[in-house]
Amino acid sequence: MDDVLIELDADERGKIEHVKALNSVWLEAAERNVEGVTVRNGKANFNARTYENYYGEDSISNDFWVDLLVELDEETLKFLKQRNVPNIGERLE
């Protein structure tokens, strides 16, 4: 299959960079809150064995999910505020 290049204007590139930077914030939050998640060179790795050994069979009921979602929300709002963006939807329009 041939590679297809799509030309992006500066605004489109800016939107992609915002989402990419926000994704990095989310990866860091996942690494801090979920045992078995590591981030190296901007890529997340998930070790299912480490996760299972740490949380066991009933992991879905553990508070770490709540902690992760709360941190994702807080970090997203902080990220957007630092860039003077009221919400991500507005930035991506």
Image (cartoon, rainbow, N blue to C red):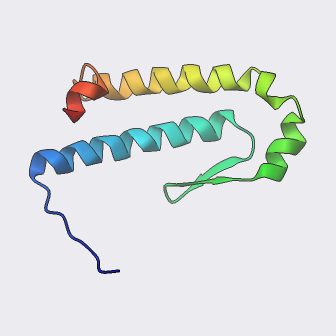
Q: Position of residue 62 (x, y in %)?
A: 79, 23
- The residue located at (84%, 51%) in the rendering is 49
The quadrant of the image that shows the C terminus is: top left
The quadrant of the image that shows the N terminus is: bottom left
In the picture, measured across the screen, residue 11 lies left or right of residue 25, that is left
Q: Judge whether 35 appears above or below 76 on screen.
A: below
Q: In this view, which residue lies farthest toward the left?
A: 9
In the picture, measured across the screen, residue 60 lies left or right of residue 71, that is right
Q: In this view, which residue lies farthest toward the bottom?
A: 2
In this view, the residue in front, 3 or 14, is 3
The quarter of the picture where residue 81 lies is top left
In this view, the residue in front, 27 or 60, is 60
- The residue located at (87%, 28%) in the rendering is 58
How many numbered circles does the render carry?
0
Q: Position of residue 23 (x, y in %)?
A: 43, 42
- The residue located at (48%, 22%) in the rendering is 73
The quarter of the picture where residue 89 lies is top left
Q: Position of residue 51 (x, y in %)?
A: 80, 43
Q: Position of residue 25 (x, y in %)?
A: 46, 38
In this view, the residue in front, 1 or 60, is 1
Q: Judge whether 65 appears above or below 51 on screen.
A: above
- The residue located at (68%, 25%) in the rendering is 65
The quarter of the picture where residue 32 lies is top right
